[in-house]
Every structure is written in C-alpha cells, then in structure tokens.
Image (cartoon, coloured by chain):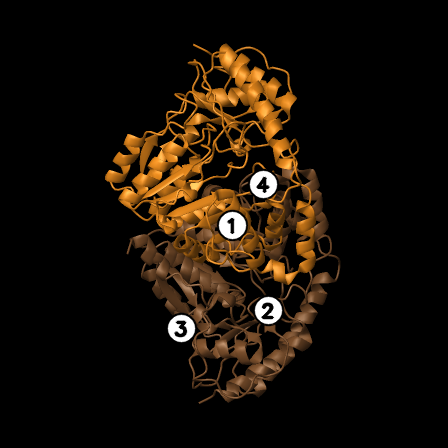
Chain colours: A brown, B orange
Amino acid sequence: MVPVESKFRTLGIDHAPGQEIRQQSNDLNAVTRGFPLEGSLVDFSHGDVDAFAPPPGSFKHFSEAVDAGGRQAYTEYRGSAEIRADLARHLSAFTAAPIDPDLGVIITPGTQGALFLAVASTVGTGDKVAIVQPDYFANRKLVEFFDGEIIPVKLDYLANESEAGLDLAQLRNAFEAGARTFLFSNPNNPTGAVYSAYEITQITGLAKEFGVTIIADQLYSRLQYADVTYTHIRAIGRVDHNQVLTIMGPSKTESLSGYRLGVAFGSTSIIERMEKLQAIVSLRAAGYNQAVLKTWFQEPVGWMEERIRAHEAIRDTLIAIFRSAGMQTRLPQAGSYLFPTLPELDVGLSDFVKLLRAQANVIVTPGTEFGPHDRSVRLNFSQDHASALAAAERIVIMARRYAK
Amino acid sequence: MVPVESKFRTLGIDHAPGQEIRQQSNDLNAVTRGFPLEGSLVDFSHGDVDAFAPPPGSFKHFSEAVDAGGRQAYTEYRGSAEIRADLARHLSAFTAAPIDPDLGVIITPGTQGALFLAVASTVGTGDKVAIVQPDYFANRKLVEFFDGEIIPVKLDYLANESEAGLDLAQLRNAFEAGARTFLFSNPNNPTGAVYSAYEITQITGLAKEFGVTIIADQLYSRLQYADVTYTHIRAIGRVDHNQVLTIMGPSKTESLSGYRLGVAFGSTSIIERMEKLQAIVSLRAAGYNQAVLKTWFQEPVGWMEERIRAHEAIRDTLIAIFRSAGMQTRLPQAGSYLFPTLPELDVGLSDFVKLLRAQANVIVTPGTEFGPHDRSVRLNFSQDHASALAAAERIVIMARRYAK
C-alpha cells in the first residue's frame, strides 16, 4: 500500500456525527433483544436547527451580500476587512482582551476549518501535542493527520463540578515530555465541563514556563448556564499573545451551521500561516456567507438569554432522567452536550449505538470517538424539549435492556 | 525556527489573485515613468460577477434550502445524496463516462477545496508528481505543502493552436523518473489552451503504462469557443476508472464563486479518502450553498451559448490588441484566461504588475505564479467588454513605457 493510503486508514469517519447513514448495516439480529420502541427520530449527533432557529436577520444579510455581488464574493482569503473589523470589536469585548482587526482575525469555513488550519499551522511531523481526554474527536485526528504525536491529558469530569477536572500534573508531564502545543475545548466537548479560573491560570502558567502554544476551541462559550464563571484563556495575559489562538463560531448556539462560518483570533503569527494555507485549502469562507456574521453578537435584546433558558431547561430534564436511572452524568456548565455513563452492557458500545438507532429511533455519538470512553455516549441536547425527553427515556430503557 | 514554520515560508500568497490589497507598498518612485493613465479599475485577477451574473434561480435554490432547515444544513460530508445523484447524471452526460452517484461524487468548498483534498489524498512525503508549466499556481503549492516532489513538464502553448503543446517526451521521462500522479488543468490555466484528442490519448496511454493517477482540473471546460474539440480524459477509458479524478465547479463560467462550490468525480477510492479528510478540514461544503448546484447544467435554453458568445467577443478584442502591439498571446480555445507575453522590460515583473495597479488602475496576476514565466501576465477576461478593452490598451501603453 502506498504510504499516503495507509495514512487514510486510520482516519475513520464511520462513527462521526452525521455519517451514520453510511454505516454498513452489519447483522445485529444475533444480539438484538426485545421489540422496537415507539417514538419519532431524535438525532442527538448534532443540534436541531429546526427546533432552535438562527437569529433574525441572518438570511437578510446573506441576501444583501448576493446583491452586493463581486465585492462580497471575492474577499481577501482571511475574509472581508469590514466584517473582520466588526468581529474584532465584538470578540475582544466578549473575551476581555484586545484583537488586531487587520492581523488578528481570520474567517474560516466553520470552526472545523479554523481548527484544521490552526493545527496545520502549528504541528509538523513528530511534534508533540497535549490533548485532553475526553475532547472533540477531530483534535486527535488532526494531530495524527499531520504526523504529530499525541500526549493525552486526563479530564476527571465526574469528580467535582466546580472545575473541569484537568489533571494538571499530567499536563506538566506532557510539557516536560516536549509537547509545545496544547489543544483543548472550553466548555469541554463532549462533557460540557467548564474550566475554572484556577485551572485556566494554571494552564497559562505552565504554557508560559514551557513556551507552549495554546489553541482554545471556545465554540460553545456563549451558551453559559446560571452561576458559571467562564474564564477566557486569552484574557489571563500571562502568555505571549502570539501563543494563544482562540476559535469560535456561530454554528452551534446560533444555529448557523448551514452557512459554515468560523473565526480564529489572537495570535497574528499563527493567523498569517492559516491564511496562507486557506489560500490552497478553500480560498476563503464562502463570500456571501461571511455577511451572516453581521448578526453575530448583535442578536436582539433577550434573544441569547431565552436560548440559554430553553437549553438549561432541557439540560435539567435530561440530567434528571439519566441520574435517576443511575447513569453518572456530568452537569454541563455551558454548551449543549451531555455525556452520560452507561451501565456495563452485554454488547459492545458500537453495537449498542446501532441498536439505539434501529430499535429506539435515537442517534447518539459513541464515547470512543472522544478517547478511550467505551461506557459513554454523547448527546447534543439542542433539540425540541419534548422529543429530547422521550428519546432520553428510550435510551434508559435500552441501557437496562442490554445491561449485564 | 520550528520546522512547521519554515514550511510556511515557501507558501507565499502575496501575489495571489485577490490578495493585492495586502502587499506592502514598497517604494516604486525610483522606477516610475510618466503619469497615471485615466480609466476605471479593472481587476483581471478574477472574473467580474457583476458583469456576468449567475444563472437565474441560484439564489432561489439557496433560499429554499434555508427554509428546508436541518435536513439541508447537515448533509453527509460528501454532500447531499439527492444533489449528488443529480450531479452524477449531468456530469456523466457532459463527460461521456458513467459516474456512481453514491460513491463517485463529492461536493467540496469550491474547486480549490476539491484540488486540496485530491492532492492530500494522493501525494505523501517524497512522492513525485508531474506538473505542467505553466499551470494553476496552487498545484505546485499543494504538492509542496504535502512534501511531494514536483517534476515539471513543459507546455509549449505558443507553438500550435490545434493542440495544447504538452511535451510528451518530458511526460514520459517524468513517469519513468517515478511520478505516480499527474495533475493538470484542461483548458490550461493560465493560457486557455485545450489539449487535443491526440494529447489526451497519449496521456492516458502513458498513465496506463506506468500506473499513474490523473487529477484533471476541468473547471473551465464548459466555456468552449467555436470549432474547439474538447476531449474529456475520463471518457478515453484506457486507464482504470479508479485512477482518474475530474474536478469541476460553477465558480467561473457560471459566476457562482461567492457560494464556494466544487465537485470531484470519478475514482471512488480517491473520493473515499477525500471525504475522510473533508470531515476534519471543513466538514462539508456549506449545506445551504450545496442547493445552488441544482441550477448547474440546467440553465435556461440559450444561457450558456450567450455566455460563450459574449466571452468569445471579448477574447477576440483583447487578442487583437495584444497581437497588434507585438505581444505574443495564445488564442484561448476555452475558459476566460489570457496569458500575453510582455516585451523585455527595464523593471522586474513584480514591479511592473504593481506599476500597472498604481498607474493604470489594472490588476493582473504575474506569470511567475504559474511557473518560471517572468515575461507574462494572466488576465481573467470575464469582464465588462468596454472596460476590458480600455484596460488592455492601458497594459499595452504601460508595456511600451517600461520596455527596454
């Protein structure tokens, strides 16, 4: 096999959210128990943009951009200067640290695009990268694709809800072992854990000590629930600003995923490399789509508060269902992910996830996508409340049905 | 310097089309001659989507996709199954060879996205790749980014307009030297040369003999001028179908660049890898945007004929201007690029291109982006006819002003 082909063998997507349709339907008859459960399909692999609509005005901005024509179709590779200036203002206010509007912001095709460009711009063959377990599955795949070496750092997310639970001794060990990039999501994907001010301060202290570059995926950082204190890592100011890159986007909380928009901001040296690479990866985030960012951080008064309230209510419903069934689950402080622990099962996790789809009309993402977590599943609970409740109850029934 | 940083030093975009705004304005005073020329700005670095509008219905399809919501926002990574089925039908008719609708098509963010994924899926460290000189600048940059080795193959595009002018002996030498991928654009970017049936047949014969994978960028293959015979390489059938990948998209001829849509089709094994990679690069082409492909190959009767007629008229005007000024220029058989040869100048090409912008309000792309072509500039003549004519005359005046 040609080397480049073997590289793609490890780059699996069969269990990735949204790809379930491409799974070979292997024979589950031998392990199936009981009858199908009634209930309409709930796809927890991503949020339901029909249940939570985009903010008003997004389509209008897109439409105006199409009318504007060439000027908006062909922006600089890093995105429209006018829109970047707006973003720099809003994002620096939100994250409590300045942003250079010309050099310190790049617009990308989704936050996935930003993550890809950021990792490609910092990680080369043999470079060691500290990655949290569990964390967003693409982090691991990206480092592997660029032939970097992963040093895992454990997140004990079930221990104490006043912090995320990062093993700071392991983080120090990873840096001592040579990791020069630390890539993590805050709130943590898949658990919804938010890093405490203490943890963020410790991370920046270690990064300063070892000269580590930090890539912070803060995709869900606007959807903060009551009583959480969220600390933006770029606001700490202990590390050289060129060593911190923050990634956000309006795909999740703001339901704008269909437009594929993301933003990376902070380190001007990393962003310079990201733009060079974007020029050969996809040129730019689609020109007309960029205009939709004009709605971001400018939603109508009360819009975000209502969105948070609705998600907090669904969160509390699902947490109550899983916990009363004895399934340990971290209470998410932000975002719309939930990562319940299943009982010990008689079937493998991959089969259980397929059975959930076949028998219970529920799609979830197996925990193994996020690290060695073969007893958990991830749910994106940005769904219709009643449907999510019914689907969570079906998960509990199925977990009992297949329990050891 | 960290290795990954040095890699980005060679990945330049300062002279890339559309990035002129980011150039440092170094001092041209020492070399400037004469006064500014009057005339409104003409940006030949890309087509003017205000002069040539997208086909009717494109925005309507986008708008309907937004209304459709989640179903269209979250497609499979390779794109909506329904749209891929349509594409397979139209593209197999156009290229005269069958396409598997499920396994043989992937929708990407622009043809740039398709090129990136295709090269990443076929070229690894040290792999040799045959690349035409001149050809689209990203081809070279992509191979370099993945640490492949380029073996250039000369295109003698000025010799004979009944063929593109590929040096077939050099192509054989490249394959004998170990190149296992051949990447080329047809019509050639930047010259508009179309490969003859004989050349295409020779390419496939050599590819079969050496087991070479062919990536054919046919972005401009719909805009064919009178009397040209266009041969789709996938229609020849001498090579294993899995070894030919064709790339097209509606960004140019159809003026849909602002939506960032491209398509790769043919080799199912390459497309499988491309989808795996797309999952970590940008997930998918923006979901709503994909729906715009429903207009592609379904334009109103006469729409494409009129577009071709208008471009052919501009082509003939510009060719006449450059040729009567003694600037050798290949007559493009397809597409909207023109690659005139400048006289010997007293200033370097990079300075001349900057002077054109500063003194003549004309933006062109230097030939050096496409290979060792420091006597040529590329024009995308998909512009308002009268403006293009006036701008071409200003280029001639400037060329004479700075000639040796």
Note whether B399 is above or below B71 in the view shown.
above
Both labels 1 and 2 in a single chain:
no
Depth order, front residue of A132/B151: B151
Eye-nearest disc, 1 or 2? 1
Q: Which residue is farthest left?
A: B176
Both labels 1 and 3 in a single chain:
no
State the SS at label 1.
strand
Q: In this image, A23 relative to B318: left or right?
A: left
State the SS at label 4.
helix
Please report whichever mark, 4 or 1, sits nearer to the chain's N-terminal start: 1
Q: Provide residue A96's location: percent of width, then percent of height.
A: 60, 54
Mark 1 in CB contact with mark 2 (< 8 angstroms): no
User: Which residue was labeled with disc 3?
Assistant: A372
Please report whichever mark, 2 or 3, sits nearer to the chain's N-terminal start: 2
Q: Which amino acid does label 4 sit on?
A: Ser
Q: In this image, B173 relative to B345: left or right?
A: left
Note whether B304 is above or below B89 in the view shown.
above
User: Which residue was labeled with disc 1?
Assistant: B108
Query: Badge 3 local density, few (<14 within 10 Å), some, or many (20+)?
Result: few
Q: What residue type is labelled 2?
A: Ser
Q: Residue A336 carries which label?
A: 2
Q: Provide residue B157's location: percent of width, then percent of height.
A: 40, 25
User: Which residue was labeled with disc 4?
Assistant: B257
Mark 2 in CB contact with mark 3 (< 8 angstroms): no
Q: Provide residue A27's location: percent of width, then percent of height.
A: 43, 78
Mark 2 to mark 3: distance in Å?
Answer: 22 Å
